[in-house]
Image (cartoon, rainbow, N blue to C red):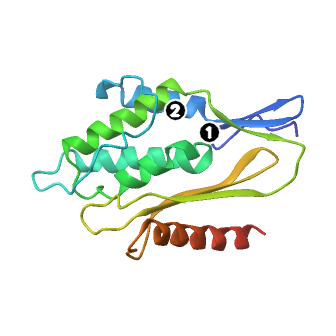
Amino acid sequence: MNEVDTILGIKVKKHSRGYALCQSHYIENLLLTFKYLQIKEANTPYEPSETLLNNSGRSVAQLEYASVIGSLMYAMHCTRPDIAFAVSKLSRYTSHPSTAHWKTINRIFGYLKKTINLSLTYYEFPAVLEGYSDASWITSANDNKSTSGWIFTIVGGAISWASKKQTCIGHSTMEFEFIALAAAGKEVEWIR
C-alpha cells in the first residue's frame, strides 16, 4: 500500500522534516453544513469575559445543538486542541441550550473559519516529552468549580490534551493549579 493521505477525515501531509495532520476538509464541510448560523471570523474561539449560565427559559434547538457539539468534539479530539476549552464549556449545556450558547458556538465556528488550515506538525527531533497544565479561576457560576487544562507534546506536536471541569472545589488559585497539575500528572504517567 502507498503512504496514507487521509484517514478518518484527517489529512496527513509529509514535509521535509516530518508530518502534519490537518482537518481543513472536515472543518470546511462543518462550515457548509451550518452556514445558516451567519458565521463571522473570530480571532479566538472563546470570549473570556463571557459568562455562560444555565438556561432558565425554553431550550433552543437542543438536538441540533448536541449534533454541533459532537462535530466540534471530533475536530477537537483529532487535531484542534485550541478549541478544547470552548467546546468543554459549551458541552455542559447540551441538554438545555439557550441563544447565548448558540452565540458562543458561532464564535467557535468563526475561529475555525479563520484558522481552517492550522495543523499539528511533528518533526523527527527532539523526541522529548513536554507538558503544560493550567487552571482557570472559578468558571462555573453555578457550582464554584474551576477548569483544568493540559497539553503534552513530543517531536514538536501535541499528542494529548484536555480541558475539563474540576471535580472538587478549591479555595484559592493555588489550589486550582495543584488540582490541574495532579490531573496532568495522571495523564503523563499513562503516556509514559
Q: Which is more toward the observer, 59 or 105? A: 105
Disc 2 residue crowd, few under 14, some 14–19, many 20+, Cα 10 Å: many
Quarter placement of the N terminus: top right
Q: Earlier in the sequence, mark 1 or mark 2?
A: 1
Q: Which is more toward the observer, 63 or 191? A: 191
The quarter of the displayed image where residue 94 is located: bottom left
- Assign a secondary structure to mark 1: loop
- Which residue is drawn at the image coordinates 74% and 45% (left, top)? 157
Left or right placement of residue 170 versus residue 123 in this view: left
Quarter placement of the C terminus: bottom right
Height in image: 106 above or below 148?
above
Percent coordinates x, y for residue 65 in the rendering:
30, 46
Percent coordinates x, y for residue 114 in the rendering:
50, 24
Percent coordinates x, y for residue 190 in the rendering:
71, 72
Furthest toward the bottom, the residue is: 168
The amino acid sitting under disc 2 is Ile
- Which residue is drawn at the image coordinates 62% and 39% (left, top)? 9
Furthest toward the left, the residue is: 57
Find disc 2 in the rendering and name its residue.
Answer: 27
Tag of residue 108: none
- Which residue is drawn at the image coordinates 55% and 34% (left, top)? 26
Left or right placement of residue 190 versus residue 62 in this view: right
Mark 1–mark 2 distance (CA, rounded to whole Å)? 10 Å
Find disc 1 in the rendering and name its residue.
Answer: 9
- Which residue is drawn at the image coordinates 89% and 28% (left, top)? 16
